[in-house]
Amino acid sequence: MADRREVHGIKRYDSPAGGWGALNATAKAVRQQMDATVAPVTLLRTNQPDGFDCPGCAWPDKEHRSTFQFCENGAKAVTWEATKKRVTPEFFAAHTVTSLLGWSDHQLENEGRLTCPMAYDHATDTYVPITWEAAFSRIGQVMRSLPDPDMAEFYTSGRASNEAAFLYQLFAREFGTNNFPDCSNMCHEATSVGLPQSIGIGKGTVSLEDFDHCELLIAMGHNPGTNHPRMMGTLHELARRGVPIIVFNPLRERALERFADPQSAMEMVTFGSTDIASSYYQVKVGGDAAALKGVQKAIVALDDAAAADGSVIDHEFISRHTNGYDAFVADLNATAWEEIEARSGLPRDALEAVAQAYVESNATIVTYGMGITQHSKGTANVHQIANLLFLRGNFGKPGAGICPLRGHSNVQGNRTVGITEKPSKDMLERIERTYGFVPPKAHGHDAVRTIQAIADGKSKVLFCLGGNFSVALPDSDASFAAMRKLDLAVHINTKLNRNHLLVGKESIVLPCLGRTELDEQSGGAQAVTVEDSMSMVHASRGKLPPASGHLRSEPAIVAGIAQATLTNSKVPWPALIADYDLIRDGIEAVFPDFAQFNERIRKPGGFRLPLPPTERVWPTLSGKAEFIPFAGLSEGQEPTSADVLTLTTLRSHDQYNTTVYGLDDRYRGVFGRRDVIFMNEDDMALHNLEHGDVVDVETALPYDRTFRLAGFTVVAYKIARGSIGAYYPEANVLVPLDYIDEESGTPSYKSVPVRISRSPQTGVTASQGAAGG
Ligand SMILES: Nc1nc2c(c(=O)[nH]1)N[C@H]1C(S)=C(S)[C@@H](COP(=O)(O)OP(=O)(O)OC[C@H]3O[C@@H](n4cnc5c(=O)[nH]c(N)nc54)[C@H](O)[C@@H]3O)O[C@H]1N2
Ligand SMILES: Nc1nc2c(c(=O)[nH]1)N[C@H]1C(S)=C(S)[C@@H](COP(=O)(O)OP(=O)(O)OC[C@H]3O[C@@H](n4cnc5c(=O)[nH]c(N)nc54)[C@H](O)[C@@H]3O)O[C@H]1N2
Ligand SMILES: [Mo]
């Protein structure tokens, strides 16, 4: 597009993903954060049998012994934690909290590792050092003065180890609440709710080996080149093996188009690459259920046309293993192609082509991410994927199954060991039997309900075991304001972030060890465990000297707080911290799937938790897999008038959730800025906008408040018509707090109806960097 105007920081990116660009970016990350002598050894320990688990993503490795051969974003995650930069008490003394609020998210975290427990001092508007003992004792005092244990909230971000998470839920439950807001509530909750309804468990069913046997892969709503980079090795292998890879994604994501494997000498020296997607369907934002219904409808039509011999639809599997097929087909028959095409933005023949590929495959895997779950119909979207897989019995056979791509490296493990606001009766009984206290039964708050309870003044204390809670939540204006109403916030973190700065009455920041660091307790050096996306549990051991002599491990901090809070606790906290084997014995006692836990994690690679659907056993209420129809396409999600577009919020290549490593998004051609709106050129023409125009975006939902993002720059992009994209967390101001998937509570971060207009603030074209809100 020679005549397109030049826009600051926007360039074409024509290369494949991976390749030399990835190697260069890794070198840069190391240079900016780490000591050149420490970096190579540390990076080589990632995901080795005796090393630590990569905090970058939850994709597994073969026998947990391969793939730190190379991974750019894994390296960024590791170097960001193992950085040589430090946030000291002197830093806090020199910067008031009010002044730090003017910093961007990137600037805050880029100051380096937290080094000392700090408490907020109103008189000076700064954080001042506090001893661990004084911090614990103050927390205990406030906690014991709460009139009701349900006035405390216990947030977890999915980096915590199984051991830390287990102790945390034990503490909160002995204290008396099930208030467990979790990053998972903003992420794969639609999976945790939807999959048990469909197949009886809330986890994926495939293993890494299944990818060696699959004949078709359908990839929906995830961006592995950035977010699950080790998956690119698997996709590259599949593509080379000639397995069709069908992508549904509103944006053209480079890594799903072409990838040069830095492991492949040939591709590197020849500047070659491999095409990944065999077909790329730019579904409308929020149009996946419609697309899936179209594919299912076309499959049923193919089956009707063929002899009912099971060569198209596996009727034997359906009659033996499922319920609800007839109602499911009736719903498909009642859905018109016009509606499917309008909602998905895809033509009928494209969806018929997918159906054809599907029926030709004897083993299909569907992988999916946030593009499926973060919608007002997220749970229903997940059901549709399961329905599609049922049609050819794609569960419980090699090479087939469902594969939700989990987010944080141990978010799945946190859930497995009891971080849930909706505990099962069985788990509570086992906790009682093991530890001798009676845990509360009433369900607690999830993430959105927590911030609502805080905003309403009903909850007064918030613990954050990792994460950046209010920045990750929707509606930054409301969420930030709520934080200031707290009596006490306790932040257990490795890095400084905005959540620490939204101070209420009291705020305490407790610095903890990261995965890469040595965790030395009185019983010797400790290992922790994590569970990956494919239910493999294995040990993780850090080796680096801690970033500061004042750091404590997450389990030790939780135990310290628990001891200072609970009078006559039944849990032997000091013993558990001396030797984490004893924590694992407790996990085993409460969760029988962890039988011989300590023994099994000592084997390299660890072990796999049981997944009944892989044996065609369905732990649903009926004991069968359930077809769950998507009732009508007309409700929710869809724009109400022609000028309304649907906004999706995205991660850049240089970001880990709210952690902004840098301001580039190389594969999308954005450099040094994040204040952009990706828009289709036809939509731009329709809205009378040009590449580079500065616009305001406003939420088009019936609220009595305005949700506005002002002064962002429009970038012409290959994105589906009617859809626009912007970065998270900047765009969180546009997502109303209660605009959620009713079934799972997941915020609808990926389908917000909006209107866009030329900004009155013209001239704001300069890069604003990572505006924090
Ligand atoms: N480097 C890095 N790694 C990460 C993270 C990170 O931020 N950085 N975050 C971690 C976490 S917590 C998570 S949950 C995962 C997130 O991993 P992903 O699920 O890949 O996350 P997103 O970037 O939010 O968006 C996913 C993709 O969905 C597409 N999409 C948007 N809307 C729709 C839609 O309506 N339909 C479809 N089909 N697609 C859509 C977008 O174009 C984008 O390609 O990654 C984990 N790993
Ligand atoms: N608009 C929009 N909003 C979203 C999303 C979206 O796609 N769009 N995605 C959602 C998703 S999927 C998720 S998972 C959430 C993420 O929400 P969170 O998990 O709350 O956020 P993170 O940005 O991952 O947390 C970053 C902080 O974690 C701390 N940290 C890092 N490592 C460790 C560690 O080892 N221990 C401890 N204790 N702390 C550590 C650091 O201090 C860092 O500042 O955001 C959600 N918000
Ligand atoms: Mo996530």
Image: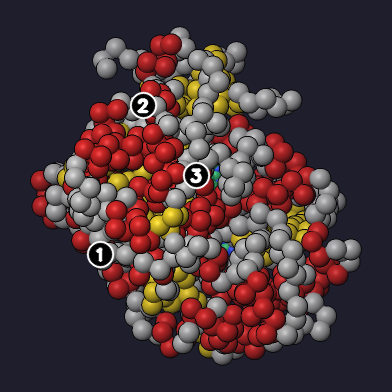
| Label 1: few (<14), some (14–19) or many (≥20) C-alpha neighbours in 10 Å | some
| Residue type (three-letter) at the residue carrying disc 1 | Pro
Split into quadrants, the picture shows ligand 1 in the one at: top left
Could you give the CA–CA distance between mark 1 and mark 2, rounded to whole angstroms? 33 Å
Query: Mark 3 highlights which residue?
Result: 380
Residue 332 seen in the figure: yes
Quadrant position of residue 33: bottom left
Could you give the CA–CA distance between mark 3 and mark 1, rounded to whole angstroms? 26 Å
Q: Residue at x 46, y 87 (%)?
A: 596
Chain-order first, disc 1 or disc 2: 2
Quadrant position of residue 341: top left
| Residue type (three-letter) at the residue carrying disc 2 | Trp
Q: Which quadrant does the N terminus fall into? A: top left
Q: Nearer the viewer, mark 3 or mark 2?
A: 2
Q: Position of residue 693 (x, y in %)?
A: 47, 16
Q: Residue at x 81, y 65 (%)?
A: 149
Query: Mark 1 highlights which residue?
Result: 398
Describe the element under mark 2 as helix, strand or loop: helix
Q: Residue at x 65, y 71 (%)?
A: 425
Could you give the CA–CA distance between mark 3 and mark 2, rounded to whole angstroms? 19 Å
Describe the element under mark 3 as helix, strand or loop: helix
Query: Mark 2 highlights which residue?
Result: 337
Q: Which quadrant does the C terminus fall into? A: top right
| Residue type (three-letter) at the residue carrying disc 3 | Ala
In front of the other: 23 or 155: 155
